[in-house]
Amino acid sequence: MSASVPRLVIAAPSSGSGKTTVATGLMAAFAARGLAVSPHKVGPDYIDPGYHALATGRVGRNLDAYLCGPELVGPLFLHGAQGCDIAVVEGVMGLYDGAAGEGELASTAHVAKLLRAPVVLVVDASSQSRSVAALVHGFASWDPEVRVGGVILNKVASDRHEELLREALEQAGVPVLGALRRAAQVSTPSRHLGLVPVAERQGAAVEAVAAMAAQVVDGCDLGALEGLARTAGAVPGGSAPWTPASPAHHPTRSDEADQQRAPVVAVAGGPAFTFSYAEHTELLTAAGADVVTFDPLRDEELPEGTAGLVIGGGFPEVYASELSANEPLRKAVAELAGSGAPVAAECAGLLYLCRELDGLPMCGVLDAGARMTERLTLGYRDAVAVGDSVLAAAGTRMRGHEFHRTAVEPGSGAEPAWGVRGPRPRVEGFVERGVHASYLHTHWASEPGVARRFVERCRTS
């Protein structure tokens, strides 16, 4: 594909400014114009991409320079944008906020520079008028390599308020590409870990996305925004699209025989387990697996012929009663794990494998208990595999992200999954027979050998 796909990065001075409303609404508005829109999200967020997928009809994808490394941002972007007319990238936090203590790494500004994409700054204009010019001027001039190509004013109170804001911004030299009034109907409900995922809202989520699109259409200059997107040149570095297939892997007759008996890898889905990167299933499939999704809230059996199990993140604490009530599936998971079959679990998956969650019986695969807490554990982690497991060989280094309000006791087993580096080094997670369970969310594109190793263990276990 062309490496010069038109693209925009939607950023803001801070969280809560309206990035998700503008980005999602803009995606839907472009799609309604007949454009094939590629949706992306900066950072490790799993929830916003679900709304992006509703807006565009395409899988929402993440661009995380910490988890995957800066060198993969361009290729992953091009992979997602194949066959598209335009791409919209929603930023994270404030424009220049990145991984703690790592400078610009993984910030929206960093990703915009890696993609050489123009930035549209969404500004919460409530409670200010002329001061908005100083704010925008500061963000636009802070880093000369970040091109702020326009501003969208959000939460504008009235026509007179908009007039004052536009007059002030004439002095900043950054064009106003839109002005949005306050609109409660575009808000999306949230809880302890952010927005409520699309899978839990269904019709309400569709209505929210439609409302976001209507607001953007009414308040923004779509022609000017599309024109700005088309000023983006080629993605730097001569990037080629990322591919889940290993370029170093050359099929042999033995490989072809293995493909004929592709192991079934069951992947947990449904409202309780919504956190997963699209690249994970692509990597598993490329490694030769037959990937089948199931819903632990409804399905009483694992998919027929399951040889391996992947349970990602989500909100099992919200659905603890329903998960516990599905005793047949809990027993099936325990039996699969007991047989030594490969099981990979992250965060919510870890909780599901415990004996209990807030006093309710779970699968009992791990001799540990889990409970909700008041404390939010949040941040990037630099980790190394403590020993060999179905996912990684000892010494494999991966970066992860932790985001939860739960605690597991004990926090690690006799064989931990990861050693977490940094000022407070620790071990965490569990490796038992074929089970690898941990709080860390990882992006397998950064280490494709993880998927290949897992599928190979599914074949041989």
Image (cartoon, grey):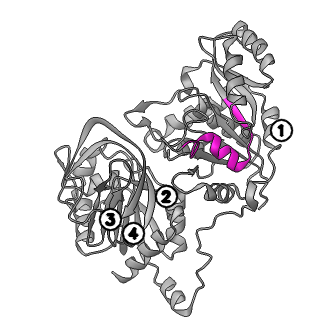
Q: Is residue 154 magenta?
A: no
Q: In the picture shown, does residue 442 fall above or below 140?
A: below
Residue 216 occupies which quadrant of the picture? top right
Label 2: which residue? 443
Q: Between 285 and 130, which is closer to the camera in this rendering? A: 130
Q: Closer to the camera, 460 or 124?
A: 124
Residue type at mark 2 is: His
Q: CA distance from mark 2 to mark 1?
A: 33 Å
The amino acid type found where label 3 is placed reads: His
Which mark is first along the chain, 1 or 4? 1
Please rate how many residues cluster around mark 4, counting C-alpha atoms within 10 Å: few if below 14, some from 14 to 19, many from 20.
Answer: some
Picture residue at 23% right of the left edge, 65% below the top? 334
Q: Secondary structure at mark 2?
A: loop
Q: CA distance from mark 3 to mark 4?
A: 15 Å
Instruction: Tell me, yes or no, whether the two marked residues, 4 and 2, touch with CB atoms within 8 Å.
Output: no
Residue situated furthest top in the rendering: 160
Label 4, on which residue?
395
Magenta span of residues: 103-121
Instruction: Please tell me the numbered disc located at residue 227.
Output: 1
